[in-house]
C-alpha cells in the first residue's frame, strides 16, 4: 500500500509589512542643521520632512543626520547608514530633531519595531523617540520619561496630555550605554490596547481606555525633542536608529522581517 506524505516548506511568520527602513539605500550622508532641511541638504528620498532643533544648546554638530557612523549591522561597508540625533542639553519646547514618513494611508493598528543605541541612559525629564500621528490633534508619542526614581517607556497622547508608563523596563538600570537594543510597540487604536517589548520580551501592556474612537496613524516622525540632561558642555550625546519596521502584527528582533520569509510552496505527494 502506498504511503502518502506531504512535504511542506513552512512559513515562520505572517506579518504584512507596512513600511521598513534600514537607511542602506542612501548613497551619501545627510546632515541637517536647520529647522527645515527640505532645501538644504534636501529631503532624503521617501520622506516628507527633515528638520533639527537649532535653538537649544548644541556644540557644532548637525542635530539630525543619516550617516555611516550610526549603522547597526554592517558598519564601515558601502552605503550602510542609519539615522542619528546629536542630543543637546535641552531642546524643548523649541525645535525638533525629526525625519518624517508618510505611510500613505490611515492605520488603526501597527507594530513599530526598531533598533536603538544611546550613548547616555540618564537624564532629567524626557526623550521623545517617535511621534505617531494623523493630525496635530491625533498624536501618540513613545518616549523615555522619568517616572519616580527610574526612566521608563511612556506612551503620551494628545487626548489626555498625560503619561502612561510601561513599568517592566528601567532604562537607567537595565540598559548598557552604546549597545543596540530591539524595541517594539503595539498600537491598537480600535481595541485601545498597547504593548511594549525589549529584545523580544514583553515589558508591559496598557488598556488604553482613554484613547478616543476614530483615531488613526498616518505619519511617523522618527525622533522629536528632548528635555532634561545630566551632562554639560562640551559633552554631547547621540541616539541612533536603524532597521525600523512597521507591520500589522508582531515583528520581533531579527535580521529579516517575517513578511520576507517565503510562504508555503512546493507541495508534493510521495508514494
Image (cartoon, rainbow, N blue to C red):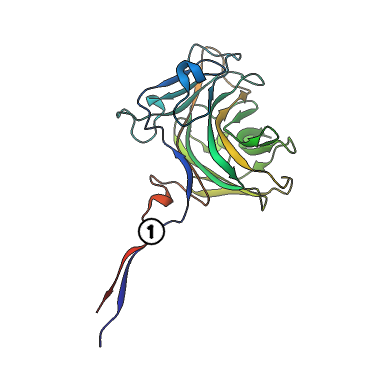
Residue 140 appears in the picture as rendered: no
Question: Picture coordinates of residue 89 (x, y %)?
Answer: 58, 18
Seen from the viewer's position, the closer of residues 42 and 180 is 42
Question: Picture coordinates of residue 98 (x, y %)?
Answer: 55, 26
Query: Which residue sits at x=70%, y=48%?
Result: 208
Instruction: Tell me how many marks there are.
Output: 1
The C terminus appears in which quarter of the rendering? Answer: bottom left
| Vertical relation: 96 (above or below) 165 | above
Secondary structure of the residue carrying tag 1 is loop
The N terminus appears in which quarter of the rendering? Answer: bottom left
Residue found farthest to the front: 104
Seen from the viewer's position, the closer of residues 79 and 149 is 79
Question: Picture coordinates of residue 186 (x, y %)?
Answer: 58, 47
Seen from the viewer's position, the closer of residues 125 and 31 is 31
Seen from the viewer's position, the closer of residues 68 and 105 is 105
Question: Picture coordinates of residue 74 (x, y %)?
Answer: 33, 34
Query: Which residue sits at x=38%, y=44%?
Result: 255
| Vertical relation: 265 (above or below) 174 | below
Q: Quadrant of residue 159 in the image?
A: top right
Task: Name the residue beneath numbered marker 1.
Answer: 263
Query: Which residue sits at x=63%, y=29%?
Result: 126
Query: Which residue sits at x=36%, y=36%?
Result: 73
**Side of 126 where 265 appears, left or right:** left
Amino acid at each position: 500500500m502506498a504511503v502518502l506524505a506531504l512535504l511542506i516548506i513552512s512559513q515562520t511568520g505572517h506579518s504584512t509589512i507596512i513600511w521598513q527602513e534600514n537607511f542602506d539605500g542612501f548613497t551619501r550622508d545627510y546632515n541637517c542643521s536647520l529647522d527645515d532641511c527640505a532645501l538644504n541638504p534636501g529631503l532624503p528620498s521617501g520622506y516628507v520632512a527633515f528638520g533639527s532643533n537649532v535653538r537649544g544648546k548644541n556644540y557644532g554638530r548637525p542635530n539630525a543626520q543619516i550617516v555611516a557612523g550610526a549603522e547597526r549591522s554592517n558598519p564601515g561597508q558601502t552605503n550602510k547608514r542609519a539615522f542619528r540625533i546629536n542630543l543637546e542639553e535641552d531642546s524643548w519646547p523649541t525645535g525638533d530633531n525629526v525625519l518624517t514618513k508618510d505611510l500613505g494611508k490611515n492605520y488603526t493598528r501597527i507594530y513599530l519595531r526598531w533598533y536603538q543605541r544611546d550613548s547616555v541612559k540618564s537624564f532629567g525629564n524626557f526623550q521623545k523617540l517617535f511621534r505617531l500621528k494623523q493630525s496635530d490633534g491625533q498624536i501618540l508619542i513613545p518616549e523615555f520619561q522619568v517616572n519616580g526614581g527610574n526612566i521608563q517607556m511612556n506612551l503620551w497622547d494628545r487626548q489626555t496630555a498625560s503619561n502612561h508608563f510601561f513599568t517592566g523596563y528601567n532604562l537607567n538600570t537595565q540598559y548598557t550605554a552604546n549597545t543596540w537594543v530591539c524595541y517594539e510597540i503595539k498600537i491598537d487604536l480600535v481595541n485601545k490596547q498597547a504593548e511594549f517589548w525589549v529584545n523580544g520580551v514583553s515589558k508591559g501592556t496598557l488598556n488604553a481606555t482613554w484613547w478616543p474612537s476614530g483615531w488613526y496613524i498616518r505619519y511617523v516622525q522618527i525622533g522629536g525633542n528632548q528635555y532634561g540632561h545630566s551632562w554639560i558642555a562640551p559633552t554631547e550625546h547621540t541616539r541612533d536608529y536603524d532597521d525600523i519596521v512597521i507591520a500589522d502584527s508582531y515583528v520581533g528582533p531579527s535580521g529579516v522581517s517575517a513578511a520576507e520569509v517565503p510562504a508555503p510552496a512546493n507541495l508534493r505527494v510521495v508514494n
